[in-house]
Image: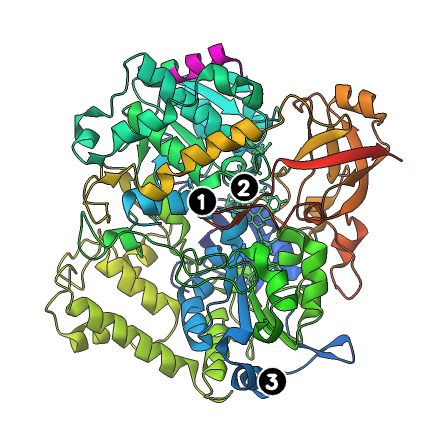
Amino acid sequence: MGTDRQHSGDDTRVAFRTCPLCEAGCGLEITVKGDTVVRIRGDRDDVFSKGFLCPKGSTLKQLHDDPDRLRRPLVKRDGVHVEVEWGEAWAVIAERLPAVLRDHGREAVGVYMGNPCAHNLGPMLYNRSLLQALGTRRRFSASTVDQAPRQVAAGFAFGSPVTVPVPDLDRTDYLVVMGANPYASNGSLCTAPDFPGRLEAIRARGGTVVVIDPRRTRTVEGADRWLAIRPGTDALLLAAMVTTLAQDGRIDPGDHVGAWLTGLDDVVLACAAFTPESVAAATGIAAADTRQLARELAAAPSGSIYGRIGTTTAGFAGTSFSTATSWLIDVVNIVTGNLDRPGGAMFPTPVAGSGNTRGRRGSGKGFTTGKGATVVRGLPEVMGEYPAAAMAEEITDAGERRMRAVVTVGGNPVLSTPNSDQLDAALAQLEFMVSVDIYLNETTRHADVILPPPSQLQRGHYDLALLQFAVRNVANYSDPVLPLPDDQPDEWEILARLGLIAAGLGPEAEPSAADDLGIATLVAGAVGDPHSSIHGRSADEILAALGAEAGPARMLDFMLQTGPFGAAFGANPEGASLAALRANPHGLDYGALQPRLPEALRTPSGTVELNHPVLLAELPRLHAALQADGAATPAADEVLLVGRRDLRSNNSWMHNIGVLVKGKERCTLLVHPLDAQRIGLTDGGQARVVARVGELTTLVQVSDEMRPGVVSLPHGWGHGVEGTRMEVAASRPGVNSNVLTDDAAIDPLSGTSVLNGIPVTLQPI
Ligand SMILES: Nc1nc2c(c(=O)[nH]1)N[C@H]1C(S)=C(S)[C@@H](COP(=O)(O)OP(=O)(O)OC[C@H]3O[C@@H](n4cnc5c(=O)[nH]c(N)nc54)[C@H](O)[C@@H]3O)O[C@H]1N2
Ligand SMILES: Nc1nc2c(c(=O)[nH]1)N[C@H]1C(S)=C(S)[C@@H](COP(=O)(O)OP(=O)(O)OC[C@H]3O[C@@H](n4cnc5c(=O)[nH]c(N)nc54)[C@H](O)[C@@H]3O)O[C@H]1N2
Ligand code: SF4
Ligand SMILES: [Mo]
């Protein structure tokens, strides 16, 4: 295979491959003998990760070999999943899915796409055709339990939801990490292999790292300073930082950004309602600390605030300000002169596939939401989706307009989305459900048909989504390490065939023919687009150069060649292409991030629309919530629940790998000693945790890592449910924290759930 190196003499070879498990995208060196993986280690020559790898990376072998990983489709017969041939699985789908569409219309079908789809070329390139074929607006994904607020804020202010600034980690002097724990997560919306090493390098070169988090995480331990914020109040702190700088007369976006900025005065004025003193009781951060933080960031030669899960999924006063928080992070980065400058918060120039490197540069249609709304709560469409938190009610409470069938692709919403008992019960009521998934788990147990894609090692890889948020402009492609078994379709073929069936073309229609048509359409669009590097060229010439082999690799080649560093089919012979990446198995490095204003903007005005009315209106709403907040007087046994991640977990689905779950129990409730004492909880004892929507019983771990009044329970556990087939996971089940999270509380602008800052009461058992 293209990127392999053959050892002479025996059948041992070394393949280089990017790890598809998390956003860091580390380079792996995989030694294979015959068709057996004998070793996986970090690729020291990888241009980006330089040998770094976490404990999960080498488990691609265990994942591949896991006897519970599905290798054949399952069909549910009399309540039990049985293995069938592919032909039979397709026949069941062809009989039942089009019938729902025919009898009840396109909106009767819903789709949920999970996180692994963002790490996988098949879904990244072919989910869209499945969605088009289904023709439903009832699209849900993990985005609304994750990053949607960050993207919506970027959409309004910069004109495109993929134009998300990332901290320039390798050149910064001052980094504020807000609601992220990259020592465990390895970073998110900031693709940076060895994120911890990059943080240590900031301090080694004399810079400063500050962490804002209700828990003293590993990231805090590696930092200069910790501000133990009360969950959900980051927007208040950020607004008060703006006010501090305004009072100091230090609002200065710099000439470069200042030239492309609208509405700064409006925003600063609206933030004046929040001062370090007026927010201190709510945030739990002393006014002097807020001032110091603002002043230090403004005075640093370069710096930025980087916000993640704690800023995009937190609740406050019964509602959520996640989009506002992401926007205010941008505001602080702007008023301190740090947007779009080296060492600050910068826009990557993705080598392939980004909406913000295509089309007209510097202005555009801008960003809107609300093309449609959910039936039950009338929640608006955002980025082509509805909130994941609305899935259950759309199945159970929408009467004749209810969702009767669901397709999941690489998702486990029963463990990942709020009020999950309710969703679990709703899925059981569906008329038909199909899952494209590698496991029979808490969600897929409800599916009538499960279609298993190939393993992580049996498919090609390019981080099309995550390299859009990388701290360097890099590109890295890997061909499949192991061949596909004879009758195993690739994931793109599964998705394409599902689409063809939904379109009424039957199970015999050819995915490759649909793909040929798809690529021809893309090429025709590009040669006709005056902004494309292949404008005016012959479509036939381009198609001939791309070759006849259908699938993601051809599509990717097209994207690389027409991207900002692309070879443009011979016009720029040294440029990026699939062939160039195959010839460079350790990746290609296109250098540090470059300033991209105004070219990266797609707003109607061609400026950063910092005072977009939808965003600006959040400040009065935030002020009202501050007044309503009962910060000082929670009920005696009430605490706020937040989540946490562990280096050896990956959301809900890697707990079937023995080496990753062995050792001490990790699904524990962390409780501060003062809270434990007050409530009567003991270390190693059990607590009942009660929230508005549900309750559970869990193991208590007393720890002064927590801010008093805040407790932490990881998500992604709660295995061993009847009808699942994950033996190792079932032996260490843990509890499902999303039984406690509330589907009613969402960020109104993005539809994103509240997964942190959940009011709960604790009782000893
Ligand atoms: N309380 C709380 N809840 C949370 C979070 C939190 O911090 N706290 N975090 C949220 C976040 S950030 C996220 S991203 C979501 C994740 O939410 P989901 O994406 O719904 O859940 P995952 O646990 O990632 O489940 C992935 C599913 O994909 C399957 N899978 C794995 N690899 C493949 C593959 O190659 N192809 C296919 N087709 N399937 C595959 C797995 O078997 C599993 O069923 O969870 C969210 N939920
Ligand atoms: N090992 C591992 N790595 C992963 C994952 C995994 O499950 N395991 N999941 C991947 C995914 S899908 C994602 S999205 C990323 C997420 O990456 P991160 O955002 O780094 O994830 P977390 O470790 O959940 O960190 C969130 C932090 O926010 C804090 N927090 C909670 N509420 C608040 C609040 O209101 N304000 C502030 N300031 N902080 C708060 C929590 O205490 C926690 O330390 O990780 C990815 N990487
Ligand atoms: S940090 Fe992420 S990408 Fe790197 S080896 Fe671990 S799981 Fe894979
Ligand atoms: Mo995520």
- Residue 433, percent from left and from top: 63, 73
Q: Is mark 3 within 8 Å of ligand 1?
A: no
Ligand 2: which quarter? top right
Q: Is residue 707 visible?
A: yes
Between discs 2 and 1, the one toward the N terminus: 1
For image coordinates 28% across by 58% down, the residue present is 560
Q: Is residue 19 above or below residue 547?
A: above
Q: Is mark 2 within 8 Å of ligand 1?
A: yes
**Residue bearing the label numbered 1:** 149
Check contact, mark 2 vs mark 1: CB within 8 A: yes
For image coordinates 52% across by 71% down, the residue present is 484
Quarter residue 275 falls in: top left
Q: Is residue 216 above or below residue 354?
A: above
Q: Residues within 10 Å of mark 1 (few under 14, many from 20)?
A: many
**Nearer the observer, 47 or 687:** 687
Q: Is residue 570 above or below residue 734?
A: below
For image coordinates 26% across by 70% down, the residue present is 522
Amino acid type at circle 1 is Pro
SS type, badge 2: loop
- Residue 609, percent from left and from top: 26, 40
Q: Nearer the viewer, mark 3 or mark 1?
A: 1
- Residue 221, percent from left and from top: 57, 21
Label 3 to label 1, Cα distance in Å?
36 Å
Q: Which quadrant is home to the N terminus?
A: bottom left
Q: Going by the image, does 135 lie left or right of 627?
A: left
**Residue bearing the label numbered 3:** 96
